[in-house]
């Protein structure tokens, strides 16, 4: 059975209401490092949204939900890039959702300070 347009709209709204953290639009270069059979592979992409607990990004290689990766991105006015561990939570084509793992309080505050003035993702 397929969902009607109004059911899809309601599901989408409920998904947004269930989010624990506000998402903010951004556009940053993103490096994703993942362990493959032949060693570590570095993938280049773009971070298009960021939140306190994770980020959304586009990379040219499909990752698997549940896969643990390393994310590296630079925040303006911060001297060194952030390098964070994350788990792939979802994927739609080349768009991936990552949840941060084990953020330090300093890393969390750095992300929050950067994200606050950015436009919200509807």
Image (cartoon, rainbow, N blue to C red):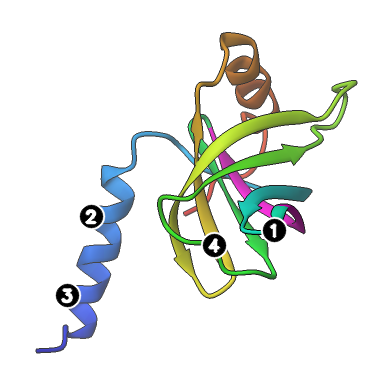
Is residue 32 in the magenta section?
no
Name the residue that disc number 4 marks.
63
Q: Height in image: 70 above or below 45?
A: above
Please say whether residue 26 is visible from this viewpoint.
no
Neighbour class for label 3 at 10 Å: few (<14), some, many (≥20)?
few
Q: CA distance from mark 4 to mark 1?
A: 16 Å
Please say whether residue 45 is visible from this viewpoint.
yes
Q: Height in image: 58 above or below 4?
A: above
Q: Is residue 19 left or right of residue 46?
A: left
Is residue 47 in the magenta section?
yes
Q: What is the residue that sits farthest to the top in this orientation?
A: 105
Q: Which mark is residue 14?
A: 2
Query: Where's residue 110, x and y in %?
Result: 68, 19
Mark 2 or mark 1: which is in front? 1
Q: CA distance from mark 2 to mark 1?
A: 41 Å
Mark earlier in primary sequence (2, 3): 3
Circle 2 — which element? helix
Residue shown at 28% from the left, 46% from the top: 17
């Amino acid at each position: 059975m397929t969902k009607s347009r109004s059911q899809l709209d309601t599901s989408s709204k409920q998904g947004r209401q269930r989010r624990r953290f506000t998402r903010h639009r951004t556009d940053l270069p993103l490096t994703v490092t993942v362990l493959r059979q032949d060693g570590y592979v570095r993938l280049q992409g773009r971070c298009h949204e960021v939140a306190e607990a994770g980020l959304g990004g586009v990379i040219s290689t499909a990752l698997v939900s549940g896969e643990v990766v390393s994310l590296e991105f630079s925040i303006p006015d911060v001297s060194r890039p952030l390098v964070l561990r994350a788990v792939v939570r979802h994927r739609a084509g080349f768009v991936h959702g990552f949840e941060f793992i084990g953020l330090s309080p300093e890393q969390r505050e750095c992300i929050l300070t950067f994200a606050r003035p950015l436009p919200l993702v509807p």
